Structures are given as C-alpha cells and as structure tokens.
Image (spheres, rainbow, N blue to C red):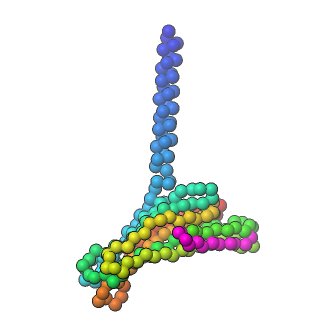
Amino acid sequence: MKNKKMLQRVSVVLVTLLALAVFQFVGSGCSDDTQRYSTQEKTNNVPGGGVILSHVDRQTYGNISGNQRSIDYYVYADYSGSETVKEIRTTWVQRAQFWRKSGSSYSAGVTMGTSSVGLNVSSGSTTQYVDSATITKYWSNTNGATHAYYDSNYIVWPRDQLRSDQLSNTARLNIYGHANPIEAVAAVSVTYQSVAP
C-alpha cells in the first residue's frame, strides 16, 4: 500500500514537472524572436512652431523561411504644428550587409514590395569582405495632410551570410512660405553575425 502511494506521488511530481517544461517551452515560443520589435523616433523643430517626427518600427529578427529572413516594418512622418503643409514625405532606406564566403561564389539580395536588389559575387573575391544591398522607397502627401505612413515587409537572403541590416526613415516637411524643407531621421540597425561565418 505504501509503495502504491509512493508511486502515485512520484507520478504526480513527474506530471507536474512535465507540465512546467511544456509551459516554459510554449512561453518561450510566444516571446521568441519573431515577436520582438525595435523602434526609434527622432524629431526636429519646425520654424513657426511644432516638430517634424520620423518613426521606424520593425521586427528585430523577423520570420525565417528556408534561407530567407522576412522583416515586417512600419514607418511614418508626422508634423505637429499649425503651418500649412505643402508636402510631407516619408522616405525609408533598407541596407543589408552580407559576409562573403571563403573561396566560393554566392548570390544575395533584398526584396521590398515590387523592388529587388541582387548581388552576384564571384569565387575570386576577397575572403570575409562585406557586400551591401540597398533599396529606397518613399510615400508623400501633397494634399495638406500632416502625416505620411507606410507599412509592409522586406525579404533578405541568404540569411546564413547576413551580417546586418538597417532600416532608416527620413521625415521631410515642406511648408508654404519656407524656402527649405525640414527633416528628421530615425534608424534601427540589427547585427546578426559580427564575424564571418
């Protein structure tokens, strides 16, 4: 009888430990890298009052599929002031850096919407050199709006050679009666591999 009770207690302990392990595993999955986001905002004062704000919000590490990394992002420009807006524009630049493979050729690139930039590096290239691919996009409003925004995703490959990537955003404001535009720049950079693989 004692052995039976002891066995029951051991079973309860094992089930409890297993449940905790499952909880920890599921919990870590819910807060894994795909759920992490990085944000930066920068402002600049506008003559006549108010500020122009540049905002960048992006997945820190993104979603992985095969040898690709997909990054969701959101950028915008916002003006808080009473001046009449001629144009407000948000211009974002994605720049990816790739490690070269030692003694072998490779292809790499970035796709953002309908735009794509590719690299084809020959096997005779210098070992551990960093190659870059850059894409620039923009969205503007000329209807007097004080806000311009855009959200989408970009895809980078191959992820096993991806050194880093940066998403920067320039908020640009043109106001009637002012000769020069006012800008604010925000950027978020992520380094995946600080040394060559």
Question: Toward the viewer: 131 or 109?
Answer: 109
Above or below, 197 against 45 in this view is: above
Give yes or no for residue 115 being in the magenta stretch: yes
Q: In the figure, residue 102 lies in which quadrant?
A: bottom right
- Where residue 124 sits: x, y (%)? 75, 73
- Where residue 162 sits: x, y (%)? 60, 64
Residue at image position (46%, 76%) is: 138
| Main secondary structure along the magenta-highlighted residues | strand
Q: Can residue 195 be spotted in the picture?
A: no
Give yes or no for residue 122 being in the magenta stretch: yes
Question: Toward the viewer: 89 or 97?
Answer: 89
Residues shaded magenta: 112-123
Residue at image position (46%, 56%) is: 36
Above or below, 33 against 190 in this view is: above
Question: Toward the viewer: 148 or 93?
Answer: 148
Q: In the figure, residue 70 lies in which quadrant?
A: bottom right
Q: Can residue 146 be spotted in the picture?
A: yes
Residue at image position (46%, 73%) is: 92
Quarter of the picture holding the C terminus: bottom right
